């Protein structure tokens, strides 16, 4: 007898998604505009506390994009579809588990575009 065991995708309360998404936004803005009050230290402590219970987010900014990626929902900017990279992150990837082995709870929502490869002058 061949029996398949289906694993249910873990559910997370709506507030936890909101918390992780907002924490990502705070971290992104602090890195972009500067952190004169050293608030990134507090952000890291909050991220550590969430990771202790198996929740974390991943920032895919700058990563290569291939059609086979299942953890991102992407919008292509521009007309070229070669050598695609993430250029804007609207929502991060939210995961549950350990860094080495985790389940995607929220796909990242990103904008991708072709990264032009500079050719050396001869």
Image (tube, rainbow, N blue to C red):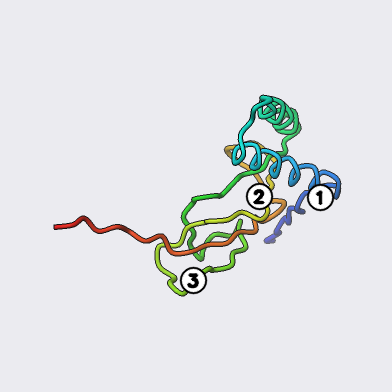
Q: Specify the quadrant that holds the C terminus.
A: bottom left
Give the image location of residue 51, x and y in percent: 70, 32
Mark 2 and mark 3: Cα distance apart in space = 22 Å
Q: Which residue is mark 3?
A: 78
**To which quarter of the image does residue 121 belong?**
bottom left
Tell me the number on the disc at residue 113.
Answer: none
Mark 1 and mark 3: Cα distance apart in space = 36 Å
**To which quarter of the image does residue 117 belong?**
bottom left
Locate residue 75 relative to residue 18 in the image: left or right: left
Q: Earlier in the sequence, mark 2 or mark 3?
A: 3
Q: Which residue is mark 2?
A: 92
Q: Nearer the viewer, residue 18 or 2?
A: 18
Q: Which residue is mark 1?
A: 11
Residue furthest out toward the bottom: 79
Q: Secondary structure at mark 1?
A: loop
Give the image location of residue 109, x and y in percent: 65, 59
Instruction: Categorize mark 2 by other alpha carbons within 10 Å: few (<14), some (14-19), many (20+).
Output: many
Give the image location of residue 88, x and y in percent: 58, 56
Residue at the spot 60% in from the left edge and 37% down from the top edge: 31
Mark 2 and mark 1: Cα distance apart in space = 17 Å
Locate residue 75 relative to residue 84 in the image: left or right: right
Q: Secondary structure at mark 2?
A: loop
- The label nearer to you, 2 versus 1, is 2
Instruction: Categorize mark 1 by other alpha carbons within 10 Å: few (<14), some (14-19), many (20+).
Output: few
Q: Nearer the viewer, residue 121 or 8?
A: 121
- The label nearer to you, 1 versus 3, is 3
Q: Specify the quadrant that holds the N terminus.
A: bottom right
Q: Nearer the viewer, residue 79 or 19?
A: 79
Q: Secondary structure at mark 3?
A: loop
Q: Are marks 1 and 3 in contact (CB under 8 Å)?
A: no
Residue furthest out toward the left: 122
Q: Earlier in the sequence, mark 2 or mark 1?
A: 1
């Amino acid at each position: 007898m061949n029996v398949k065991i289906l694993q249910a995708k873990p559910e997370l309360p709506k507030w936890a998604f909101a918390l992780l998404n907002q924490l990502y936004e705070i971290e992104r803005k602090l890195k972009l505009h500067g952190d004169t009050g050293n608030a990134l230290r507090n952000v890291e402590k909050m991220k550590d506390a969430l990771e202790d219970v198996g929740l974390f987010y991943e920032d895919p900014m700058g990563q290569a994009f291939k059609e086979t990626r299942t953890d991102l929902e992407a919008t292509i900017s521009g007309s070229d579809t070669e050598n695609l990279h993430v250029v804007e992150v609207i929502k991060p990837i939210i995961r549950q588990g350990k860094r080495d082995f985790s389940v995607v709870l929220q796909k990242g929502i990103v904008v991708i575009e072709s990264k032009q490869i500079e050719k050396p002058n001869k």
